Amino acid sequence: MKVLVPVKRVIDYNVKAKVKADGSGVDLANVKMSMNPFDEIAVEEAIRLKEKGVAEEVVVVSIGVKQAAETLRTALAMGADRAILVVAADDVHTDIEPLAVAKILKAVIDEEQPKLVIAGKQAIDNDMNATGQMLAALLGWGQATFASKVEIEGEAAKVTREVDGGLQTIEVKLPAIVTADLRLNEPRYASLPNIMKAKKKPLDEKTAADYGVDVTPRLSVVKTAEPEGRKAGIKVGSVDELVSKLKEAGVV
Amino acid sequence: MAVLLLGEVTNGALSVDATAKAVNALKALGDVTVLCAGSAAKAAGEAAAKIDGVAKVLVAENDLYGHRLAEPTAALLVSLAGDYDHIAAPATTDAKNIMPRVAALLDVMVISDVSKVVDADTFERPVYAGNAIQTVKSSDPKKVMTIRTASFDAAGQGGSASVADQAAAEDPGLSKWVADEVAKSDRPELTSAGRVVSGGRGVGSEENFAIIEKLADKLGAAVGASRAAVDSGFAPNDWQVGQTGKIVAPELYVAIGISGAIQHLAGMKDSKVIVAINKDEEAPIFQIADYGLVGDLFQIVPELTEKL
């Protein structure tokens, strides 16, 4: 079974995003970029399926700027076999919308014919939480989002999902899309020898035009602003003082 | 202009709070029709009809919709889409699962987590874990969106919308339900609770979370957790408050042993009164807390529980 994992290059999880003074967006110039954390979990899950002998090949795909090749190398160093880079933007500030990403991924999948796609549930930049679901729709495949456990059983995937109020387990026919939630696994760090090896693994470079996909955004960004601040209140000196303040405020 | 709103129906009951907040967010855009789908949905439909501002209710009662699977529910919404300009749902995990699928089937871009409706085409939504608020204008013929309910007040009661039955759409037959593991709790539901007590990494272990739970029970509050606490295995994921978890806006939010990472703040900063208890007086949580208490949570929390 071939497993395909889409990965996105985003602002590093530990870097605080700063809004540009002109309101045109978040400043990404000279900012550390990394693999989207939920995508790392997806890559890890695919590699574990390979290690268990369930998957034969793990193919990683990234859509965005040329520099996303670095993100793909990280996935290859973790243990993916092969990478496809689809260049769809010149400027790091251009975010390709999930609908366009899903259309490009569909075209890649039509060629690659994987049996399972594992994606991160959400990118930490646009926070859309949409690509996996949109891809499933375009392919006419089933979807198991927000996964905390994935088991392949014959021609189906049994997936436990993180939902409001608890967990839901569903069975989805293969081929299918799974999106990874936080607790699915803990991604490994790539070792130095594996980072060296990854440099020799195949990385194909394509463009959005190769797949005939129009990436013009449907949502134009009118403005990007800092969220409204909230003022610091007071420090209290004791539990008694806290209780009396809460009583004054009428919340207990 | 007409709006189709997917009501949040779980085991036959409508989540009135989430649905009423979404109604309030959307009613300026046109007549709101609420769709209640489930293996039992009549009672939910009747509850939806009473929400002020609802023009019409559609009840799709069918076993297909019993377990809130994305594919059949998305197919149902798509079958109804022709009559509506806006198709929306409160941003629950179910809706986040379903609505992007609906959008892609209609070849439009989904607009997730709308925190403000500017006009029929223009919406605000948080991005970058709440570090920025983006205003987006959609050029799509139909808008498919999820509503961040914590950003809106609930519409009142007193409506009397008409209720009609809605036939099921075709079954895509791609997935089936196996089991639900619902955390049994007498506590209020996190996203609609009036009070929330949350623990973070500082709580230290799953066992130690008992002191958080005791305070919550004393206050009749829901229990929340930071992503760090969930990541460390101290608390289940469905307790997670933050940009990648649940967004809450209670009257009282008590943050215990939570440093205040921006991704957590994005999930709770609309709370009316915020209390922070942390041993690190430099913790960012104190910059947004109304009342901060610096000290050892293992002494403070039991004392607070006793004195309330």
Image (cartoon, coloured by chain):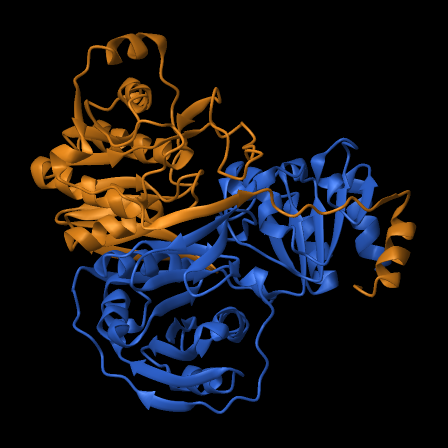
Q: Residue furthest front?
A: A22
Please tell me which residue is depicted at 61% across the width and 38% down the height of the picture: B205
Is residue B188 left or right of B308 when viewed as pictured? left
Residue A77 location (% of width, % of height) = 29, 17
Quadrant where the C terminus of chain A lies? bottom right
Q: Is B182 rendered above or below residue B275? A: below
* Residue B182 appears in the picture as rendered: no
* Residue B58 occupies quadrant: bottom left
Is residue A163 left or right of A116 when viewed as pictured? right
Q: Is B72 rendered above or below residue A243? A: below
Please tell me which residue is depicted at 76% across the width and 31% down the height of the picture: B280
* Residue A237 appears in the picture as rendered: yes
Count the marks: how many? 0
Residue A205 location (% of width, % of height) = 18, 23
* Residue B42 occupies quadrant: bottom left
Is residue B204 left or right of B135 when viewed as pictured? right
Q: Is A176 rendered above or below residue B83? A: above
Residue B183 location (% of width, % of height) = 49, 60
* Residue A65 occupies quadrant: top left
Quadrant where the N terminus of chain A lies? top left
Q: Nearer the viewer, residue B130 or B299?
A: B130
Residue B307 location (% of width, % of height) = 86, 57
The tint of chain B in the picture is: blue
Letter of the orange chain: A
